[in-house]
Image (cartoon, helix red, strand yellow):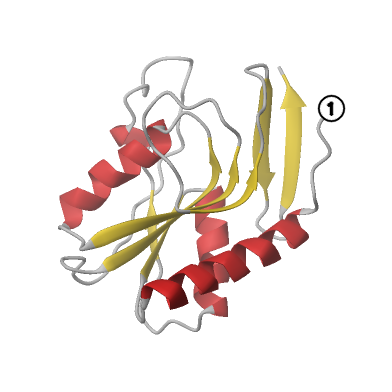
Amino acid sequence: MTELPSATELYDRFEGLVRERLKTDGVQRPLVVGIHTGGAWLAQRLHRALALSEPLGTLDISFYRDDFSSGGLHPQVRPSSLSGDIDGRTILLVDDVLYSGRTVRAAMNELFDYGRPERVILAVLVDRGGRELPIAADICALQLDLPRGQHLKLRGPDPLQLELKTA
C-alpha cells in the first residue's frame, strides 16, 4: 500500500505551487474555478488564501462527461456557478485527483460554454497516473503511479483527508 502525506501537508504544498506559478506567469486576477466536489473544496481554500475579490466559480460537469451513462454513474447534480465574463481571462481550474483526464475534458467543455478564456491553468492536488486522454496538469502537488485497482479520493471539506482504496 502506498504511503500518502497528510492532506494538510499536501494542500500547503499545493497552495505554494499555485502562488509560485501565478507570480511567475504574472497573473494578477485569476478566476478560480473548482470542479465539484473535491476541486471545489480546494478552490474555496485557495480563493480565501489568495484574497481574491471576484467570486469563486464552481463546475458540476456531470452532464458533460462522456462516460455519464456507463459504469453505473448516478451523479448528484449540483449547479455550476460562474459569475461575470470569462472571455479573455486566465482561469485557474482546480481539481483534486487527475486520473483518466475525462473530468478535466468535461470541465473544459463546460467552461467554453460560458465564453472563451485567454488561458486555463490546471491545478490538481494529486496526479495518480492512468491517463486515457492527452491532458496534463500545470500544477500538481503529488504524482503517484497507482495501478488500475486502486482509487484515490479526497474526503472533506473540513478536514481534508486523502483515502486510498483497493477495489
Quadrant housing the N terminus? top right
Which quadrant would residue 41 be assigned to in this image? bottom right
- Is residue 35 shown above or below 117? above
In percent of width and height, residue 51 lies at 50, 84
Q: Nearer the viewer, residue 103 or 41?
A: 103
Is any part of residue 76 visible from this angle? yes
Quadrant housing the C terminus? top right
Disc 1 crowd, CA 10 A, few/some/many (<14, 14-19, 20+): few
Q: Secondary structure at mark 1?
A: loop
* Residue at x-position 67% and y-position 27%: 146
Q: How many marks?
A: 1
In percent of width and height, residue 135 lies at 39, 37
Q: Nearer the viewer, residue 70 or 96?
A: 96
Q: Amino acid at mark 1?
A: Met
Give left or right: position of 112 versus 61: left
Q: Nearer the viewer, residue 139 or 96?
A: 139
Is any part of residue 159 visible from this angle? no
In percent of width and height, residue 70 lies at 41, 15
* Residue at x-position 21% and y-position 66%: 86
- Is residue 72 shown above or below 84? above
* Residue at x-position 29% and y-position 35%: 64
Residue underneath mark 1: 1
Give left or right: position of 80 versus 46: left
Give left or right: position of 111 versus 127: left
In percent of width and height, residue 130 lies at 54, 25
Which quadrant would residue 56 be assigned to in this image? bottom left
Q: Nearer the viewer, residue 135 or 150?
A: 135
- Is residue 57 shown above or below 99? below
